[in-house]
Structure formats: C-alpha cells, structure tokens
Image (cartoon, rainbow, N blue to C red):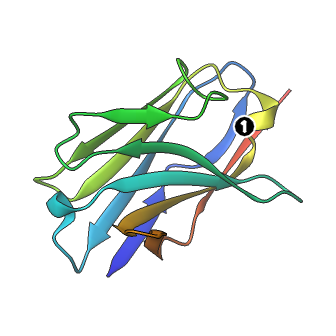
Amino acid sequence: VQLVESGGGLVQSGGSLRLSCAASGFTFSTHWVYWVRQAPGKGLEWVSSILIEGESTYYADSVKDRFTVSRDNANNTLYLEMTSLKPEDTALYYCARGCCEGIFADYWGQGTQVTVAS
C-alpha cells in the first residue's frame, strides 16, 4: 500500500492550491479516504473525509466552504481543492486510508507541506 501526496507549496493568503494523493497497492475504490493535517507544533487535525464513491463528503468546521474533497476511482487519486487559504491553514497535509471499526486509518502518506503567507 502506498499513498503519495503532492501539490503543496507556498501561497499568499487568499490563494488556492490543489493537493493530490496517488494511491497504489490496494483497491482504492473500496476504501474511505481522508485528509489530515498537522500544523507546526500541534497535533493531527482531521480535515475531510470522502466515502467510497464520493457520494458523501465531510469537513472540519475550520475548512468548510473553503475546501473541497473529491476522488477519481478510475485513476486511484484523491484530491483536496483549497481556496481562500489562511495562514492558519499552514500545515503538513496527509492523506490516509480508512480502516475499520476502532481504527481511524491504517495507511498514511508522507505528507505535502502547505505554507500560507500573510
């Protein structure tokens, strides 16, 4: 199983970025997948979830109405479209594969850094 994030970078406040997560080594279309972030000096923060066919999506209050999660099961890719970025969105962004009852996620990517300058 491998999850590889990309698309991070430095952006000005109010700007936009699109993150991607390429999945391999498992049947992507049968798993929930998540975006999780970790700001400098802080713990992990769940950002968004998307169900198997993308029929339902969920967001943390801190990103609702600014971020959009989507997935392309044909190409085994998860996306996070981020708009109206704020300095507090600065973090290392991870994608993770949903696991099973009692376990949030069993595989994680290495993360992609997003830095929002004020």
Vertical comparison of 93 with 81: above or below: below
How many numbered marks, from 0 up?
1
> x%, y% of residue 23?
30, 67
Please name the amino acid that badge 1 sits on.
Answer: Asp
Q: Is residue 101 left or right of residue 29?
A: right
> x%, y% of residue 39?
78, 52
Q: Is residue 10 left or right of residue 25?
A: right
Q: Where is the N terminus found, in terms of image quarters?
A: bottom left
Residue pictured at 63% horizontal, 23% vertical: 15
> x%, y% of residue 64?
55, 23
Vertical comparison of 82 with 73: above or below: above
Question: Pointer 1: what residue?
Answer: 89
Q: Is residue 22 left or right of residue 95?
A: left
Instruction: Give the camera-side residue of 64 and 1.
Output: 64
Where on the picture, by quarter, is residue 107?
bottom left
Looking at the image, which residue sits at the far front?
102
Instruction: Give the camera-side residue of 44 and 118.
Output: 44
Residue pictured at 50% horizontal, 51% vertical: 35
Residue pictured at 16% horizontal, 70% vertical: 27
Q: Where is the C terminus found, in terms of image quarters?
A: top right
Residue pictured at 42% horizontal, 68% vertical: 4
Q: Secondary structure at mark 1?
A: helix
Q: Is residue 96 left or right of residue 30?
A: right
> x%, y% of residue 106?
43, 76
Vertical comparison of 48 with 86: above or below: below
